[in-house]
Every structure is written in C-alpha cells, then in structure tokens.
C-alpha cells in the first residue's frame, strides 16, 4: 500500500475504496470471514500494476488516445508480475489478472467470459467500476451513483448477483 501511496495518493485511495466496497459486497453475498479478508486484500492490490504506467499518461487532463489507453491496459500484466515477485497468493493474482475481464468476453487482457471469471474478480470488477465512475477525473465530473448503477446493470458484462449486492450495500 505504501508504494501505491508514494506513487499516487489518488490511486491508493481508489484501491482502498475498492477494497472496502468489495468486502461489503462479499459480506452481502455471505462469504466467510477468511474469504472476506482475502477479497479485501485482492481489492487493495488489484491496480498494483498502475505503477508501471507513465504518470504523463495517468495524469493527462484529457481523454486518452487509443495508444495511451493500450499502455494503461498493460497495468494488468505488470500487476501480475509484481504480485508474483512479491509472493502474493493465487487469489490475488487472479483478481489482478481478471478485474477488467467482462462476462460477455468484451474485457481485457484476454477476453475471458462467463464461468472463466472467478467470483472475487467479478466482485472487484463491480466495485472498481462503481468507485471509478463516482470519482471525478481531470477530464470529467464524477458520475452520480445512479449513473454508475445504470452502467453496472448491464448484466451481459457484470454479474447480476454482485450488482444486486452492491445496490443493497448502497441502500444502507
Ligand atoms: Fe485496473
């Protein structure tokens, strides 16, 4: 966590929020205490590979070009390599690897789909999108929670049970 905070405090905050929300969603899905601990850690580590992306791209005040976006996508591969070198557990590697995969196969880096994407990754994906959309970016305002939920209610891409759990969490 310290390395993320030093690299970019906003990124560290994003990861903390994703970890917290993932844990709350997991609780709604009745995961056990040990699983919730693992899920929370994986949520904290999911964007570790962002430290390999040039800051001029990360902090660009406009939308990224396709080429720049391709550089950002490499954070998945970089994150897996870093986490592997640090001796992280398989569940962490899996979440780093799969948090941008989508159920309909439209995600990256591989285009996995359906049952190929594990539950932790489905949860962190939903938490990640919600936290990212509801935070402001240099090139746009923060989306309202309803707008983020409208995006997440695309059940071709996101697990409907996980999104329902998120809605329950947000209602409290
Ligand atoms: Fe990511």
Image (tube, rainbow, N blue to C red):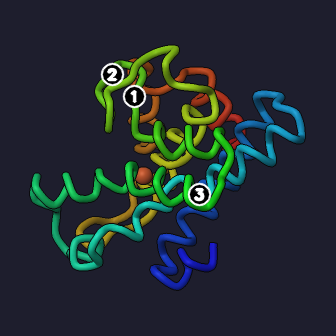
In the displayed structure image, the side of residue 105 where residue 121 appears, left or right: right
Q: Secondary structure at mark 3?
A: helix
Residue at the right extreme?
33
> Residue 118 sits in which quadrant?
top right
Question: CB of mark 2 within 8 Å of CB of mark 1?
Answer: yes
Residue at the top extreme?
115
Q: Is residue 107 above or below residue 52?
A: above
Q: Position of residue 117 (x, y in %)?
A: 51, 24
Q: Quadrant of the N terminus?
A: bottom right
Q: For the point 53% across and 53% down, which residue is it?
A: 46
Along the viewing direction, whichever of 167 and 126 lies nearer the viewer: 126
Q: Secondary structure at mark 1?
A: loop
In the displayed structure image, the side of residue 99 where residue 142 appears, left or right: left
> Residue 113 sits in which quadrant?
top left
Q: For the point 29% across and 78% down, which residue is it?
A: 55
- State the residue position of label 3: 45
Along the viewing direction, whichever of 137 and 170 lies nearer the viewer: 137
- State the residue position of label 2: 105
- Mark sitting earlier along the chain (1/3): 3
Density class for disc 1 (Cα within 10 Å; few <14, some 14-19, many ≥20) is many
* Tally of numbered tags: 3
Q: Position of residue 123 (x, y in %)?
A: 60, 36
State the mark number for residue 102.
1
Q: Is residue 68 above or below residue 161?
A: below
Q: Is residue 14 above or below residue 120?
A: below
Density class for disc 2 (Cα within 10 Å; few <14, some 14-19, many ≥20) is some
């Amino acid at each position: 966590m310290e390395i993320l905070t030093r690299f970019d405090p906003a990124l560290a905050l994003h990861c903390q929020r994703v970890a917290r929300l993932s844990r709350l969603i997991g609780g709604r899905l009745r995961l056990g205490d040990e699983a919730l601990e693992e899920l929370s850690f994986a949520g904290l580590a999911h964007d570790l590979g962002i430290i390999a992306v040039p800051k001029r791209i990360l902090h660009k005040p406009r939308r990224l070009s396709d080429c720049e976006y391709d550089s950002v996508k490499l954070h998945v591969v970089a994150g897996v390599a870093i986490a592997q070198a640090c001796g992280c557990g398989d569940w962490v590697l899996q979440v780093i690897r799969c948090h941008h995969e989508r159920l309909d196969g439209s995600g990256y880096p591989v285009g996995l789909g359906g049952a190929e994407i594990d539950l932790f990754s489905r949860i962190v994906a939903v938490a990640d999108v919600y936290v990212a959309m509801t935070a402001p970016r240099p090139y746009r305002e923060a989306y309202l929670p309803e707008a983020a939920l409208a995006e997440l209610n695309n059940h071709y891409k996101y697990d409907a049970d996980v999104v329902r759990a998120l809605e329950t969490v947000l209602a409290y």
